[in-house]
Amino acid sequence: MSNNSSNNSNNNNCSNNDSSSNNSNNNIIQPDQYGRRLKYLRISVTPACNFKCIYCKPHTENSMSLAGEKILSYDDILFVSEVFAGLGVNRLRVTGGEPLVRKDIVPFLSKLSAINGIEEVMITTNGSLLTKYSDDLLKAGVSRLNISLDTLNAERFNYIAGTNTNMFNDTMAGIRTAIRTDFKQVKINAVMIKGFNDDELLDFVNFAAEENIIMRFIEFMPVGNHDLWSKENIITSDMILKQLAHLNPQQLQKDKNTGPAVNYKLSNGATIGIITPITKHFCDDCDKVRLTYDGYIRSCLLDDREIDINDAIKSRDTNMLIECIKEALAIKSKEYDKNSVEVKNGYNRTMSRIGG
């Protein structure tokens, strides 16, 4: 599998031009030019996944093959995370690919949770391995789970995930195991696609009510197998709320754990969230950047520009890394380019290579 990141990255050493800088990273980094303060880092630990979801990556990719890939070591990621924490970041989310397929992930998460200043470590997962890992994740300090689940139908799951129906059973068992484990919160994320799973909206809502979890609906984005993407395939917030009008959705107040979602309480007891990256951006409140598995900082999911931090990582140069982080914040746009989102050739990295 080829790595396209260098084609759109700023390949420099992020050299420190401030002669007054010292070797301490204990100063809180300043807000970006639009007043947004960095608090949240999403960390991709691997591009590998045991699924091949149609909206995430092309079927031509072997999702478990890492031949020739450069993957940051756990020590590399811990170094970067410690620097971010010293600059005021207090929340980390570990993603992939599927993060639980990476060897020794639990001991790494324990070390991540122990970083001074980190208040929460969270994971986004497809859920298929949670029967095995839920207890260990909790002991390692993971507080919240986001689980991707795009259908409650086994046959449809097989088609969407590009796998067999046994994985559906594993996923549902993993979700129920996670719900029974004492995490602070479990959220289910469904990418809603017209003609694929939009007929399951009420099934998802009822599932959320029965299991007492938050069900989040996400607009289909052209990051991954963009040949399937078009504006006509998007299920918008307005469409969802119209279909659920009989359940009297009441909007809830946002907090730091709401993220980009707008949450609603329904009369059947369900709590749902709607995430609208395409039709109603939420850039004004963005407090995050992404660390890719191969050593780049990506300021926005829907912006191919990335900052190469590999030199800073290799040399364990804290000041250089701080300058790279500042540069990443400097190129962080006020909002994503809506025109670029609608182009036919999509983005250079698939979702699994950015960090879901």
Image (cartoon, helix red, strand yellow):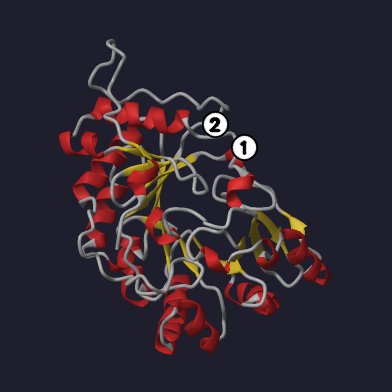
Q: Which mark is residue 44?
A: none
Q: Position of residue 14 (x, y in %)?
A: 30, 27
Q: Residue at x 19, y 47 (%)?
A: 75
Contact flag, marks 1 and 2 (Cβ < 8 Å): yes
Residue 222, by quadrant, is bottom right
Q: Position of residue 69 (x, y in %)?
A: 23, 58
Question: CA separation, marks 1 and 2?
Answer: 7 Å
Left or right of residue 238, residue 322 in this image: left
* Residue picked out by circle 1: 284
Left or right of residue 316, residue 134 in this image: right
Depth check, front residue: 112 or 274: 274
User: Can you name the residue that lies furthest to the left here?
Assistant: 315
Q: Position of residue 163 (x, y in %)?
A: 41, 82
Q: Amino acid at mark 2?
A: Arg
Depth check, front residue: 235 or 148: 235
Q: Residue at x 28, y 40 (%)?
A: 80
- The crowding category of the residue bearing disc 2, from other C-alpha atoms within 10 Å (few below 14, some 14 to 19, many at least 20), is some
* Residue picked out by circle 2: 36
Disc 2 secondary structure class: loop
Depth check, front residue: 164 or 189: 164
Residue 117, by quadrant, is top left
Q: Amino acid at mark 1?
A: Asp
Q: Is residue 20 above or below residue 290?
A: above
Disc 1 secondary structure class: helix
- Earlier sequence position, callout 1 versus callout 2: 2
Which quadrant does the N terminus fall into?
bottom left
